[in-house]
Image: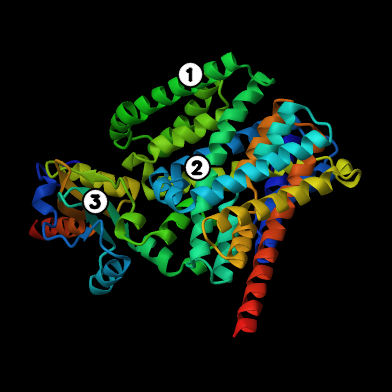
Amino acid sequence: MSGIFPELKVSKLMERNIVFLQEDASINDVLDLFEKHHFHLFPVINDEGNLVGVIDQDIILEILLFHRIPRVKHTHLAAVRSLGSDVKGIMVTHPVTISPDTDLNEAADLMLKHRVNNVCVVENRKLVGVLTKHDIINEVIKRKRSV
Amino acid sequence: MEILLQIFLILFLAKVLGEVIERAGFPGILGEISAGVIVGFVLLRPDIEILSFLAELGAVFLLFTAGYREVHLKELRTATKKALIPTVIQIIFVFYLGFLVARVFGFGLLESLFMGVAFSPTSIGVTVKTLIDLDYLSSRVGSMILSSAILDDIIGIFMLSVFATFATLNQLPSILHILIITGKLVLFILIMFLLGWKIYPVIFNYIHRMHVKESIFSFVVMIALLSAYLATLFGLHSVIGAFIGGLLLSNIPFAKIEGVQDKVSGLAYGILVPFFFAFIGLSIDTGTLITGYFTVFVVATAIIGKLVGGFIGSRIVGFGNYDSLFFGAGMIPRAEVGLVILAVGKSAGIVSIEMFSAIVFMVVSSIIVSPVLLKLVTMMKEKSNKAVL
């Protein structure tokens, strides 16, 4: 990947206009958000604006179709989520994050190698953006066309 | 090379029988245990040394994945608030009943304590499916069953850590021994916590940049093995180390990437854990099940213990008669943690083959009986509601 984005930082490409959830929002708020926006993932922040987790489509599908998921997935965690009444109770804690100063080549490697579709960008624990595979694809296409 | 055939046969039967039993509406674990029983009959000379090693790895990865993927300590506070009294009452009740039955049948003190412990943990997976089928998952009592099963899991693992260490001593410890064990456990947790807090996050920041294939997956597996080994250095059982190692990794983002979790789960549930359950089946002595009343008593007391203990506990916190019975019936199934406790006791030479076989039979029975009883209580409740109307 080295050389494709010389000296380009994540901050240049990331989406700054983020749709996010507050950790104490209700499950219905989450469903409304998924209905309104076609994003795969929503970051979750606390009152101080710190990133505390994420909610993705898998979690929502698991909650909506809990009666359909196979018995092997009836784990402790699934039970905890089924009991959850707010975002805090169902979110994935400790998501993968990067800093806005990260080299874009490194971010692209991370997404390619570990099949991560979206990464939250944080600065001093505060959520400042989201970088998606789509952003990187668009940038590569733009550069190829300009050549 | 006959071992390759044995491994193939165990995995094949475990998966095929597991599927048949899942489709019949029961958990696949019953198929995996049955695979072991069948292999015991079919193979004249199973390679016990290699199979028991694979089974031990299975137990290590069963507890590791529990810590790494499934157990949420953060939620324990909510679960405790909701279900502490009924959970503790049913555990004390069933533990004492198990201990008492073993003593009445003339088993030693340590072996009887192991039976009490093996009686205690409830398996959540079995109950959830029935709660969904009966449309009880979101009911007040359904929610309490889930909270109680979460709490029960943690108490079960705590009991496992204490009694598995007793097993390594192979005797009932003196006060001094207990103090030494507690000291070692605290020191071990401190070291593990330090690794998980300061060392692992830094290491994983480098691991994810490595160029070799599957670096993160490989290091997650290494940490499972290292944690299990470190526990044994402290005189604790390997499964406890694996569980704590898993818990520590559950907070590290790179170790929890979805793809890595899937691979760890594939290694555990695709290969190693079926060996653990199949080896349980392979190790039981069907002869001891047929002769004597002990097995009958074990099954009956394990079921009645949870039913009555759960009933009393939920009555105390204000549930009605039917809901309290429902709660008791929901807490009946035993599986993973109970079987690990049993296997630890057996490999340490504390649990005899007679008790081992009877408890495995109890686990199988509890999984089958619980959904039937839950349905029965629901029907009784509906009938009584109609009569009132």
Front one among B63 and B98: B98
* Chain under callout 2: B
Q: In this view, does A21 lie above or below B189?
A: below
Q: Which SS class for mark 3?
A: strand
- Amino acid, disc 1: Gly
Q: Which SS class for mark 1?
A: helix
Q: Quadrant of residue B373 in the image? A: bottom right
Checking the image for residue B183, the label placed there is 1
Checking the image for residue B35, the label placed there is none
Q: Which residue does the numbered mark 2 point to in the structure image?
A: B65
> Measured from the top left, where is residue B101 in percent x and y?
78, 40
> Measured from the top left, where is residue B364 in percent x and y?
72, 52
Q: Is residue B186 above or below residue B369?
A: above
**Measured Cα–Cα span from mark 3 to mark 1:** 42 Å
> Measured from the top left, where is residue A19 in percent x and y?
18, 62
**Measured Cα–Cα span from mark 2 to mark 3:** 25 Å
